[in-house]
Amino acid sequence: MLDKVRDWFGFGPMTLGFGGHGHDHSDAGGHGHTHGVIDPTIATTDRGIWAIKWSFVILVITAALQLVVVFISGSVALLADTIHNVGDAVTAIPLWIAFMLARGKPSKTFTYGLGRVEDLAGIIIVLIILFSAIVAGYEAIDRLINPRPIAFLGWVAVAGLIGFIGNELVAVFRIRVGREINSAALIADGYHARTDGFTSLAVVLGAIGVWLGFPLADPIIGLLITVAIFAIVWQSSKAVLTRMLDGVEPGIVDEIHHAAEHVQGIERVRSVQARWIGHRLHADVAISVPNTATATEIMSVTEALKSELFEHLPALAEANIRLESSVGPGAGRAETAHAEQHAPEPFKVACDLATGTLEIVDTPAGERMRLTVDQHADDLMTATVIIDRFGGPETLPLQSVAGDHHRLESTVAPAEPHEFQAKLILVAKDRQQEVPFKIDGSRRSG
């Protein structure tokens, strides 16, 4: 019985991190508590989204009940606490908007989908909370300068208790679900809601102070809560703006490096780039492998690294792995001095897994390696170009463009020079084919 009580109030055992590795990864994607931003480690599970929705419902009901008492009593402390609870509730709105708009497939205009809508909604919510905090602060200062009696002190105290109970229910709910899905972020949100509950109790203290003959207790409490809201606005705006400027938490980059340490065959992680699109993470990782590595070994290394990345980062939606030479960018030019001159036409692919045309094309984003597929096997899974360079192989995974599986492109430009020998690696469910080809950049038509 005692263990159940301890667990109900959040003092039972909990497991942090992303699970399964024997070490803590809980900082890799965390944001602390912010308004207008949903932590991605919560959003990646249906159970976590369910918890957010019901937390929203509980806090909305709590704030609505408090708002009624605000209008009949004129308590600025209760007004500030109500705004605080509304700010917690509307945190879920950007996620719902993003999910509704993200149901459609990427288009030729929005090739990454509409995940950025979540960031725009976050900015709007932060501005709304900021405006509300200014109003609450103004009312508190005005009440300090021009004191006015507060009506229905008993109901003000009751509304403060309602705020405490509502936040405590949310706290217990988030903590329990957080433990079920192993989400350190949702557990932390639960403890934050518990702290908000004690803020609501401050409203009760203000009402008691007024009842005891100190009328300024109410505006003073309101002003203190307003200061807390401004601090939240500052923290939240930094988080949202960081996302909009393609910023990520340093722990994410560290986690990607850490994932690479689990993969044999990687000599060095040469660069890491990551960005949030909505609540989903996209990463580009450049690695170097031994010069003696075969095409099959390179494919094995890249697939193993992808597997580790998805295991370490639950919010990861896409991982692009490319190979970079371990020598300077100009080293490969010595090799091309002896290269043969080949026909300028694009390379025609004809094998059991696919037929089509492979070429380097100019796109609005720059040069890309493109495979235009005429026909392909039903179980074709991946297509990758591996270019032989003087300092080591360069790998270019080909991905579908705007959901079109008949047009596959690399996400980055092939390195200079554009005169090379290469292999197209096609992988199906239970088979793999290597198609060698050559590109002569000096005679390639644009």
Image: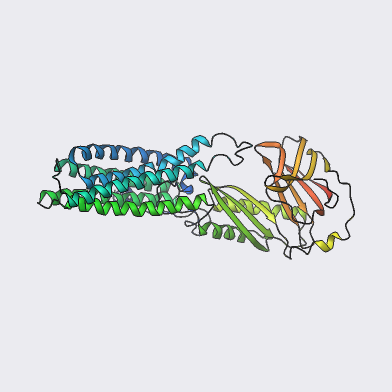
Q: Nearer the viewer, residue 146 or 437?
A: 146
- Residue 320: where, in percent of width, then height? 65, 50
Residue at image x 35%, y 48%? 130
Give x and y (percent) for residue 400: 68, 40
> Measured from the top left, where is residue 442 in percent x and y?
84, 53
Left or right of residue 352: residue 307: left
47 vs 215, nearest the viewer: 215
The single residue placed furthest to the left in the displayed view is 213
Left or right side of 129 for 42: right
Please say whether residue 84 is visible from this viewpoint: no
Residue 162 shows in the view: yes
Query: Residue at (47%, 40%) from the top-left corner?
Result: 46
> In front: 24, or 276?
276
322 in relation to 278, above or below = below
Residue 350 occupies which quadrant of the picture?
top right
| Relative height, residue 4 to residue 331 (above, below) | above
Total number of numbered discs in the rendering: 0
Relative to 391, say whether 106 is above or below: above
The quadrant the C terminus occupies is top right
Picture quadrant of residue 323:
bottom right
Which x, y percent locates residue 391?
77, 63
Q: Is residue 396 left or right of residue 335?
A: left
Colour setting: rainbow
